[in-house]
Image (cartoon, rainbow, N blue to C red):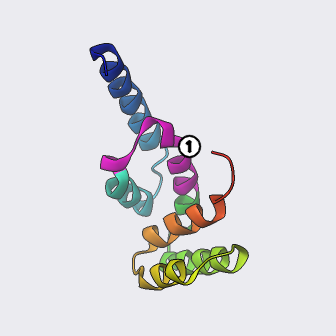
């Protein structure tokens, strides 16, 4: 990878992080950003924006229950195998549940 390409990727990542920060409108969204910041890539910012929209929509009292309901709904509305169901049942963090629900709903759809 050339120095120009590395610099370009770095600038794109910086813009993606700034765009994500602009969407943080709840304590839960701030936590979501903190969890995924080191994994955020410029090509994935749209997926993170979608996750933030869901987090912001559900934030507040009952957030954990709402996140669990989102994951249950995703499990029921998509075809999953036993390994995915076991993973879903092992998640005890609401943002992780929402992220898995997003992946399940997006599986098989174009990026």
* Residue 35 in the image, given as x and y percentages of width and height: 33, 58
Q: Residue at x 53, y 56 (%)?
A: 51
Where residue 13 appears, as percent x and y from the top left, is: 38, 32
The N terminus lies in quadrant: top left
Q: Residue at x 49, y 45 (%)?
A: 23
- Classify residue 2 by image quadrant: top left
User: Residue 77 magenta-drawn?
Assistant: no
Residue toward you, 5 or 16: 5
Residue 97 pos. (x, y %)? 49, 72
- Majority secondary structure of the magenta segment? helix
Find disc 1 in the rendering and name its residue.
Answer: 46
Identify the residue at the far top of this view: 4
Name above or below for residue 86 compared with residue 101.
below
Relative to residue 81, is residue 18 depicted above or below? Answer: above
Give the mark count.
1
Left or right: where 31 falls relative to 54: left
- 49 to 14, vertically: above or below: below
Residue farthest toward the left in the current orientation of the protein: 3
Q: Residues within 10 Å of mark 1 (few under 14, many from 20)?
A: few
- Please report the residue visible at 40 percent of the width from the left and 35 percent of the height from the top: 18
Percent x, y of residue 63 = 50, 75
Q: Looking at the image, which residue sits at the far right?
A: 77
For the point 49% across and 37% down, the residue is 43
Asked which secondary structure carries label 1, the reply is: helix
Q: Which residues are magenta?
A: 37-53
Tell me the quarter of the image containing the C terminus.
top right
Q: Is residue 45 magenta?
A: yes
């Amino acid at each position: 990878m050339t120095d120009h390409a590395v610099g370009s990727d770095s600038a794109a990542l910086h813009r993606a992080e700034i765009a994500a920060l602009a969407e943080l409108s709840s304590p839960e969204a701030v936590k979501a950003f903190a969890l995924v910041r080191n994994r955020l890539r410029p090509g994935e910012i749209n997926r993170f924006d979608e996750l933030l929209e869901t987090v912001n929509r559900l934030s507040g009292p009952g957030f954990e229950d709402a996140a669990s309901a989102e994951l249950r709904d995703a499990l029921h509305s998509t075809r999953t195998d036993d390994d995915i169901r076991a993973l879903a049942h092992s998640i005890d963090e609401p943002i992780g549940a929402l992220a898995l629900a997003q992946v399940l709903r997006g599986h098989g759809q174009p990026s």
